[in-house]
């Protein structure tokens, strides 16, 4: 801990060049942990769908509102003013308060007495999480040089599969043993305990301090640009900078289209495994958490590393990498969901939900689970370069507004609504067909990212 404190003291001067590599990676590690808690608290409701629906007598559409609109409405809109503050004041203080708030409301979900109170608590989680992501993007961009940013942001995005896996496993096992209320309370209290660690060990680096890298070794740290050069611009100036750029809209709506399916499938696959594969709550917790952890981490790192390498030759690689990934993932998803039929064709008379089918589905699900997260590193890195260093947090928040308002609010509700709509025709298999229809959003995302690959070079700001 003494080495971390020494490095932290160096970074405390506000110059990102002064921070040792060890401290930079320590900061990245803390941010990954917080992002993990972010997604743990956000996604835990997916594995708790069955007990929540049973206790409060909810339809799939109503549960979609809990997982989507209740969280996304204030999460997306409040991110803008919070990001405006983060471009002017301490990003670390803002993230500390945000973590405490969303964790506290997660714990309160465990004492909800009905649909209305649970809806309000989920809104509270969204309010807190509104301050958790955009400031972190900005911190990472100021701790890592441009040549490493896509990989650093991809590493930060490890918090997504780690959080989803932890939420699925821990939430499912706690709910199966002690009930869903205990699951909410335990994970909420955990976040409250981590908040002081962030505040006491992480410093804000100087904004834009690594945007001009030294061309040769020097005896002392390179002096960062004057503070005035990176003074936070007015909000409308950020809007006027981004709005005329086609790349901003193509990247934002491309990410949003992928998130409609990504968030929706992540929230509803646990229910699909229980309904269509016949798994219990605890079995689903182990099964799905392993898929998310292995596939998600591999996919995120693949996207970040590929974009950093290919991006040196062409900026178009940033959106093209996820575009290709989505085109591959769609048929893999459909094949994985029909593993029983594949095994039945090869082994007539076998159990469609037996070990062979589950093992085949697990292996195939790893592919789209990884590919569907490839976009995170490349696209978030590209958004960081659509404006100057002083507007990165606000630019990220505007991007996240579009991505999350459509991705979370629409995505999770869409699959629940479509499942209810198709239930008279397909019965218990209606969720399967709802997921089939959602695959079209990945195809739309690919098309938008391909278009972005043609405009990004012109809109890029070094």
Image (cartoon, rainbow, N blue to C red):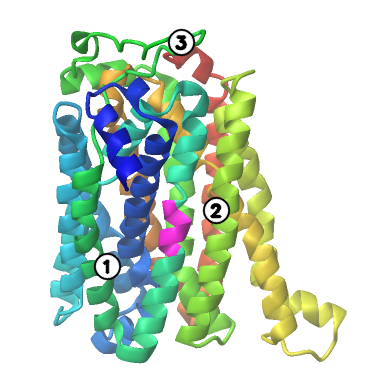
- The residue stretch that appears in magenta: 159-164
Q: Which of the 4 image quadrants contains residue 195?
A: bottom left
Instruction: Tell me whether circle 1 and circle 3 mark residues in contact (CB < 8 Å).
Output: no
Q: Quadrant of the C terminus?
A: top left
Mark 1 and mark 2: Cα distance apart in space: 27 Å
Residue 234 in picture, x, y percent from top left: 15, 19
- Residue that badge 1 annotates: 66
Q: Nearer the viewer, residue 169 or 356?
A: 169
The reply to whether the magenta stretch includes residue 218 is no
- What's the magenta bit mostly, secondary-structure-wise? helix
Judged left or right of residue 9, residue 335 is right
Instruction: Tell me whether circle 1 and circle 2 mark residues in contact (CB < 8 Å).
Output: no
Q: Give the label, 1 or 2, closer to the camera.
A: 2
Q: Helix, strand or loop at disc 3?
A: loop
Mark 1 and mark 3: Cα distance apart in space: 50 Å
The reply to whether the magenta stretch includes residue 162 is yes
Q: Earlier in the sequence, mark 1 or mark 2?
A: 1
- Residue that badge 2 annotates: 297
Residue 55 in picture, x, y percent from top left: 26, 88
* Numbered tag placed on residue 214 in the rendering: 3
Residue 58 in picture, x, y percent from top left: 29, 81
Q: Helix, strand or loop at disc 2?
A: helix
Q: Would residue 308 be seen by someone viewing this image from the given angle?
A: yes
Decide: is 348 above or below 368: below
Decide: is 431 above or below 303: below
């Amino acid at each position: 801990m003494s080495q971390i404190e020494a490095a932290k003291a160096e970074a405390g001067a506000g110059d990102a060049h002064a921070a040792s590599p060890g401290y930079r990676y320590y900061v990245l590690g803390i941010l990954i942990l917080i992002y993990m808690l972010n997604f743990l608290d956000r996604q835990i409701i997916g594995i708790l769908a069955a007990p929540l629906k049973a206790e409060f007598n909810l339809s799939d559409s109503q549960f979609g509102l809990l997982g989507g609109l209740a969280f996304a409405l204030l999460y997306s809109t409040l991110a803008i003013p919070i990001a405006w503050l983060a471009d002017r004041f301490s990003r670390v203080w803002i993230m500390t308060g945000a973590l405490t708030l969303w964790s506290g409301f997660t714990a309160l979900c465990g004492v909800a007495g009905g649909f209305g109170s649970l809806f309000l608590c989920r809104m509270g989680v969204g309010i807190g999480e509104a301050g958790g992501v955009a400031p972190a993007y900005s911190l990472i961009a100021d701790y890592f040089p441009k040549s490493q940013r896509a990989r650093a942001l991809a590493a930060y995005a490890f918090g997504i599969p780690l959080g989803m896996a932890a939420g699925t496993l821990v939430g499912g096992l706690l709910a199966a043993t002690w009930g869903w209320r205990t699951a909410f309370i335990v994970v909420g209290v955990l976040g409250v305990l981590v908040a002081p660690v962030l505040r006491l060990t992480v410093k804000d680096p100087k904004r834009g301090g690594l945007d001009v890298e030294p061309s040769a070794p020097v005896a002392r740290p390179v002096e960062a640009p004057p503070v005035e050069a990176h003074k936070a611009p007015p909000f409308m100036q950020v809007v006027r900078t981004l709005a005329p750029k086609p790349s901003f809209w193509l990247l934002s709506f491309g990410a949003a289209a992928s998130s409609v399916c990504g968030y929706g499938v992540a929230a509803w696959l646990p229910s699909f495994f229980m309904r269509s594969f016949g798994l219990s709550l605890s079995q689903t917790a182990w099964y799905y958490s392993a898929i998310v952890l292995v596939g998600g981490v591999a996919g995120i790192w693949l996207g970040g590393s590929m974009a950093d390498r290919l991006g040196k030759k062409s900026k178009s690689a940033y959106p093209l990498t996820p575009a290709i990934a989505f085109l591959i993932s769609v048929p893999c998803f459909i094949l994985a969901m029909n593993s029983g039929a594949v095994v039945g064709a090869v082994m007539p008379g076998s159990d469609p939900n037996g070990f062979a089918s589950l093992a085949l589905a697990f292996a195939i699900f790893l592919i789209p689970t990884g590919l569907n997260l490839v976009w995170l590193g490349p696209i978030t890195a590209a958004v960081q370069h659509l404006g100057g260093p002083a507007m990165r947090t606000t630019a990220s928040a505007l991007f996240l507004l579009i991505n999350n308002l459509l991705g979370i609010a629409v995505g999770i509700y869409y699959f629940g609504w479509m499942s209810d709509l198709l239930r008279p025709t397909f019965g218990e298999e209606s969720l399967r067909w709802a997921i089939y229809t959602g695959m079209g959003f990945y195809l739309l995302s690919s098309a938008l990212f391909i278009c972005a690959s043609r405009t990004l070079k012109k809109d890029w700001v070094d």
